[in-house]
Image (tube, helix red, strand yellow):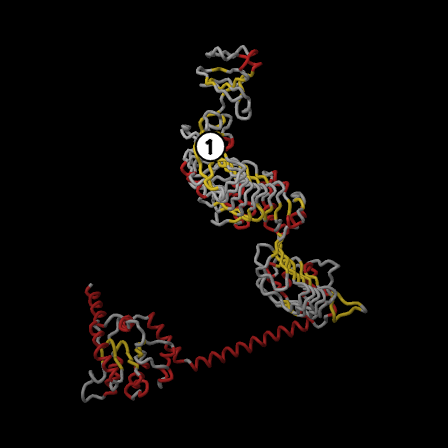
């Protein structure tokens, strides 16, 4: 018999069970909704419960014995806080959105509304293409459903977008391959396409389908999903079933759903591959993740989604609690590639893992599908990674996180020197180099990361002096069967119990008595002896710690050493004195020049009573020099109130030129030499005399090098000193030479005189 619904117009108080007033009461002839309804009064309770008073109108056709059950309707309107609004009713027993995402139903699924049916009509039997039709054609239902299962439909009906009021589609067990046009059905609530041949879902397939609640794509042929395939801004699907597909990759955005409400995502037996992170998402502490159940039961993958994210960014470990589903994270019968990444995740997140009890069924595909026993320490030790980057040629490099180490095995590889580089890691390195031909232990930049260094059976005969300083993390250095004569003093920084030298000894001398003292301080174990090859006590070798009495000349050697040091020091001081004298003789002009410049900086010449600011010395026979001085230099100096003396222009007729030049130089504050190519070559008696007078008078001398003259082109040693020290203004540079010159000259004499007069007046 079909369900008969009667709406009671009067309130009913059901004190024994509901204890609440209801606006309406559903009376049903069937009892099929026990999991979603709250029973108030059964047939027997109706007779026995005298406290339940009912005021209602019953028609004559309805008798008490034909009412099998009286129930209180347990649903109410609900709008989720996250995602687009949905027209759903939620069970009143739910107290949060997570519960409502699982126990909410549309009105038509609760029997409060009937759905009309649309039917499939083939338009081409060969291609199995079809259209949807209403039947009867004059149907007036508000919502419709299309159910067509177990047929040979190869694609969605071509006019499906014309049926905007479809809320349910069930095309199970057909031959459909693509569903890209499905997003036109904005009111669709349930889409069941299990058992078809769909191969791919894009992130546009379910775009802007706000009412889509149930999606079943199980038992298809899908190999991959686009990132954010069903988590768009206007999409929030509560039930997603991708079980029994053939995924090779699943993007992490399809399982780490940000700020999306859902009840269950089912990937059972669907993944045989690994996760991807196309958009490089990271965990945001302000967002919510994974509100419902996630099942990967029966999958085979390289790592679960948590260890995948941690491998990309270990700092996410603090956000693991945000990523754990509030429902069930089901990994029953899952096989993982149990490598170093999985080991680090499992060991570091034990508290989180205890929140996921279904992880107990994990198995390791790379260990013969053996069950992953999380309580067995050896389980984690077997989780390793082979490293290829920076792994030396012919060597094997293994990372073992549970032991916090990288093992680099280069034994029996015929290597003749230490590797230049090792794999980068936060773990310490165990470098195994036994049975090779490494005769010298050379220093390498990675030595501070070495925990074990095995150089046994190499015949090592030399060790770099700084090796001991670098082996700061060492717990074992094996040099068995070495050919060493001595040890570097930097070994004093190591624990002697960590240095294994085997049966071969060293030569004990006065210079290495520290070795015995070092071993005594470290209380070396008797199973790790070190003997003196050159000292015997009878038929047996002498321990290094006991070699002192046999080294009788060590005291005299200390005296000789002290005398040698004193003699060497005296010879060194004598050599330094001779060198200083030679340098002073060779560069005495440069030294004088530097001292004069230093004196000019600390001793101001503001009170000078000189007549001229600048004495200009240049080769008057050189056209370029004369044009530069007369047309440019003097004009700039005069415009800045500087007074100048120019030989030839300012000398009196009939006077002795030598005497007048001497007086003019002495009455000038600065001697300015315009050094040209002709000036340096000719160095006439007058120009030489002018420069010599300025030098001997301790005048401030400035040189403008017009032709980039070098030291080899100048005869005067004083000018060469200026050139060697770069104490000149070069005309060949792009800098403002006149500004440099004026800055060097300072204030003109006239300005200084005026300032002195002002001070005297005050």
**Picture residue at 21% right of the left edge, 66% below the top:** 760
Residues 327 and 734: in front is: 327
- Residue on which the image places disc 1: 145
**Element at label 1:** strand
Residue 305: quarter of image: top right
Q: Is residue 436 left or right of residue 88?
A: right
Residues 664 and 348: in front is: 348
Q: Quadrant of the image for the N terminus?
A: top right
**Picture residue at 32% right of the left edge, 74% below the top:** 733
Residue 738 is situated, as x and y percent measured from the top left of the image, at 26, 73
Residue 324 appears in the picture as rendered: no
Residue 104 is situated, as x and y percent measured from the top left of the image, at 49, 30
User: For the image shown, how many numbered marks are present on the structure?
Assistant: 1
Q: Is residue 310 left or right of residue 135?
A: right
Q: Is residue 5 above or below residue 206?
A: above
Q: Is residue 288 left or right of residue 474?
A: left
Q: Is residue 587 above or below residue 169?
A: below
Residue 609 appears in the picture as rendered: yes
Residues 199 and 2: in front is: 2
């Amino acid at each position: 018999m079909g369900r008969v619904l009667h709406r009671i117009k009067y309130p009913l108080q059901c004190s024994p069970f509901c204890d609440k007033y209801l606006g309406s009461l559903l009376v049903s002839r069937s009892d099929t909704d026990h999991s979603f309804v709250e029973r108030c009064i059964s047939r027997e309770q109706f007779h026995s419960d005298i406290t339940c008073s009912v005021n209602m109108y019953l028609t004559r056709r309805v008798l008490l014995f034909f009412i099998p059950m009286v129930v209180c309707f347990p649903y109410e309107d609900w709008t989720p806080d996250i995602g687009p609004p949905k027209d759903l009713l939620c069970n009143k027993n739910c107290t949060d959105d997570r519960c409502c995402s699982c126990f909410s139903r549309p009105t038509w699924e609760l029997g409060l509304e009937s759905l009309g049916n649309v039917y499939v009509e083939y338009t081409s039997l060969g291609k199995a293409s079809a259209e949807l039709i209403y039947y009867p054609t004059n149907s007036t239902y508000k919502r419709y459903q299309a159910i067509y299962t177990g047929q040979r439909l190869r694609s969605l009906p071509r006019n499906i977008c014309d049926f905007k009021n479809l809320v349910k589609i069930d095309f199970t067990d057909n031959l459909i391959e693509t569903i890209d046009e499905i997003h036109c059905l904005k009111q669709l609530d349930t889409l069941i396409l299990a058992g078809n041949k769909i191969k791919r879902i894009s992130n546009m397939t379910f775009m802007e389908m706000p009412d889509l609640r149930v999606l079943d794509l199980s038992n298809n042929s899908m190999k991959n999903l686009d990132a954010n395939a069903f988590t768009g801004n206007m999409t929030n699907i509560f039930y997603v079933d991708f079980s029994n597909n053939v995924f090779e990759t699943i993007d992490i955005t399809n399982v780490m759903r940000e700020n999306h409400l859902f009840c269950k995502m089912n990937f059972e037996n669907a993944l045989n591959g690994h996760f991807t992170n196309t958009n490089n998402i990271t965990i945001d502490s302000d967002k919510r993740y994974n509100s419902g159940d996630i099942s990967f039961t029966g999958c085979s993958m390289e790592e679960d989604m948590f260890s995948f994210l941690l491998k990309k960014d270990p700092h996410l470990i603090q956000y693991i609690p945000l990523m754990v589903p509030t429902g069930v994270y089901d990994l029953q019968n899952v096989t993982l590639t149990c490598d170093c990444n999985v080991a680090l995740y499992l060991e570091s997140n034990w508290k989180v893992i205890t929140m996921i009890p279904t992880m107990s069924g994990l198995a390791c595909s790379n260990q013969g599908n053996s069950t992953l026993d999380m309580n067995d320490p050896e389980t984690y030790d077997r989780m390793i990674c082979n490293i290829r980057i920076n792994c030396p040629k012919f060597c094997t490099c293994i990372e073992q996180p549970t032991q916090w180490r990288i093992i680099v095995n280069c034994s029996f590889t015929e290597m003749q020197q230490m590797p230049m580089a090792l794999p980068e890691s936060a773990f310490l390195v165990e470098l195994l180099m036994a049975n090779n031909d490494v005769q010298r232990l050379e220093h390498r930049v990675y030595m501070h990361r070495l925990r074990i260094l095995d150089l046994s059976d190499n015949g090592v005969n030399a060790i770099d002096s700084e090796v001991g300083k670098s082996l700061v993390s060492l717990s074992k250095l094996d040099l068995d069967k070495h050919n060493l004569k001595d040890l570097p003093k930097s070994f004093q920084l190591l624990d002697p119990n960590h240095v294994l030298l085997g049966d071969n000894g060293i030569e004990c001398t006065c210079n290495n008595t520290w070795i015995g003292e070092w071993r005594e301080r470290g209380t070396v174990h008797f199973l790790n002896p070190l003997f003196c090859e050159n000292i015997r006590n009878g038929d047996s070798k002498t321990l290094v710690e006991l070699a002192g009495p046999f080294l009788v000349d060590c005291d005299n050697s200390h005296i000789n050493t002290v005398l040698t040091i004193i003699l060497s020091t005296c010879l060194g001081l004598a050599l330094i004195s001779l060198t200083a004298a030679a340098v002073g003789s060779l560069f005495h002009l440069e030294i004088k020049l530097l001292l004069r410049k230093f004196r000019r900086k600390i001793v101001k010449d503001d009170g000078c009573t000189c007549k001229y600011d600048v004495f200009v010395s240049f080769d008057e026979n050189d056209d370029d020099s004369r044009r530069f001085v007369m047309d440019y230099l003097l004009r700039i100096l005069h415009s800045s109130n500087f007074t100048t003396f120019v030989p030839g222009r300012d000398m009196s007729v009939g006077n002795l030129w030598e005497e007048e030049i001497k007086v003019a130089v002495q009455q000038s504050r600065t001697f300015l030499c315009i050094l040209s190519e002709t000036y340096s070559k000719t160095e006439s008696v007058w120009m030489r005399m002018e420069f010599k007078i300025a030098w001997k008078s301790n005048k401030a001398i400035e040189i403008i090098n017009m032709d980039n003259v070098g030291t080899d082109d100048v005869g005067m040693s004083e000018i060469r000193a200026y050139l060697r020290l770069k104490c000149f203004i070069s005309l060949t540079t792009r800098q403002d030479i006149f500004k440099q010159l004026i800055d060097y000259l300072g204030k003109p004499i006239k300005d200084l005189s005026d300032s002195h007069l002002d001070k005297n007046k005050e």
